[in-house]
Image (cartoon, rainbow, N blue to C red):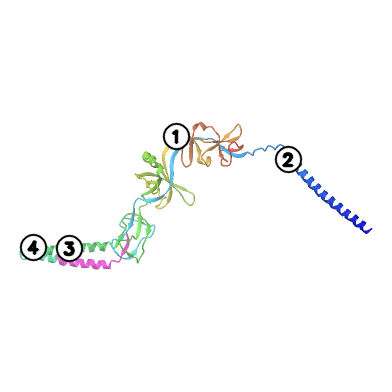
Amino acid sequence: MVAFAQIHRGANTLGKRLFFVFFRYFILLLGTAMIAYGIMQFLSKSPEEKTPTAVPVILATPEYGTLQESISLNAHIQSDHMVALLPLVSGELETVSFELGDRVEKDQVLAQIDSEAYEQQRAQAASAKEVAQTTFMRIERLFQAKAVSEQAYEEAKANRDATRAQWELAELQMKNTAIKAPIAGTVIQKYASQGNIASPEQPIALIADQEALSVKAHIPAYYFDIIQAQKDQLAIHVRRTDASGNVHSAKASLQAVAPSIDPSSNTFSLICTLQEQNGTFVPGMAVTIQIIYNQLEGVYLLKQEDRTVGGAFYLYDEETKTARYENITIIAENDFLVAIDPAYKDASFIVGGQHTVLDGQPVSVQQTR
């Protein structure tokens, strides 16, 4: 009886295990079938067509006008007449009567070197000159009376001349203790002050004539032949922007063009003189120089900023309302404008959004420039 009960419990346990195994496989097969069914349903559906998004753009048509072919460069103002203020004798600076930025006149005394030693030298030289002159006059009378030899006469004469030259040198050195402005102009550098030791090897100031200003530009070698061929017709403008954003400009005339190219920088130099600048430019000031070497009349113009990064354009196709990529023939250009093939004079160019639109992409016109 006990054995029969054990057999019955074992049969129940085995039956339960078989049921759970069957149930797990059934769930697995059911899940697999549902996944497969879903995939088949997905693949059987035709993909929905997406409507491309229209890119907002701004349009413009070419403007009829004049193009000036030019090159713009950074440069600095310089003075045509700049002179170092050099002492002509050595000594302690007793007074310095100028400051940086002062306007000075030619021969104005700007500093004074201690003159005591030079006064003593002048006094000694004057005394020696007087003695030599007196001696020469006495020897000359004796020579005329044939009382002394010609050699004695020549020696007295040479001594007189030597002492006179020494006196003149001492007199000149005494005058040179007063340091005078060599030109009229403005003090743009000050190197010394009262109490410093001055010497002819060391300038104490730099003076510039700010009425005679020029600009020296270094131009890429590419433009050498162009500038040389057009140098008699060049139009030159010099500009700067002040701290308030105001633009100051002046015309300039060509002064000189270098006849050769500097191989170290692959540039050549051009110097021009400012005209009617009204004190708005000073030496050392950074400026922009624009050199106009050619002028084209009656051309169709777009802005440089209207082009793509690669230098091409996007046109607007009115019929399909899409963008069309075009490499257009460029007739001429400068830093700001580009003259295009007149065949495109009536075309609509994408000038806003041209950096994001693609060839053939639908566009939405927002405005016209």
Is 131 contained in the magenta span?
A: yes
Q: How many neighbours does mark 2 have within 10 angstroms: few (below 14), some (14-19), or many (20 or more)? A: few
What amino acid type should be assigned to the residue bearing mark 3? Ala
Give the residue at mark 2: 42
Task: Compute the Cα span from label 3 to label 4.
Answer: 18 Å
The image shows residue 107, relative to residue 299, as above or below, that is: below
SS majority, magenta: helix
The image shows residue 150, relative to residue 356, as above or below, that is: below
Number of the front mark, 3 or 2: 2
Q: Is residue 349 left or right of residue 253?
A: right
Residue at the far right: name it.
Answer: 1
Q: Position of residue 52 (x, y in %)?
A: 64, 38
Magenta segment: 109-132
Is residue 270 among the parts visible in the rendering?
no
Q: Position of residue 196 (x, y in %)?
A: 34, 65
The label on residue 220 is none
Give the residue at mark 1: 297
Number of the front mark, 2 or 4: 2
Give the residue at mark 4: 150
Is 122 contained in the magenta span?
A: yes
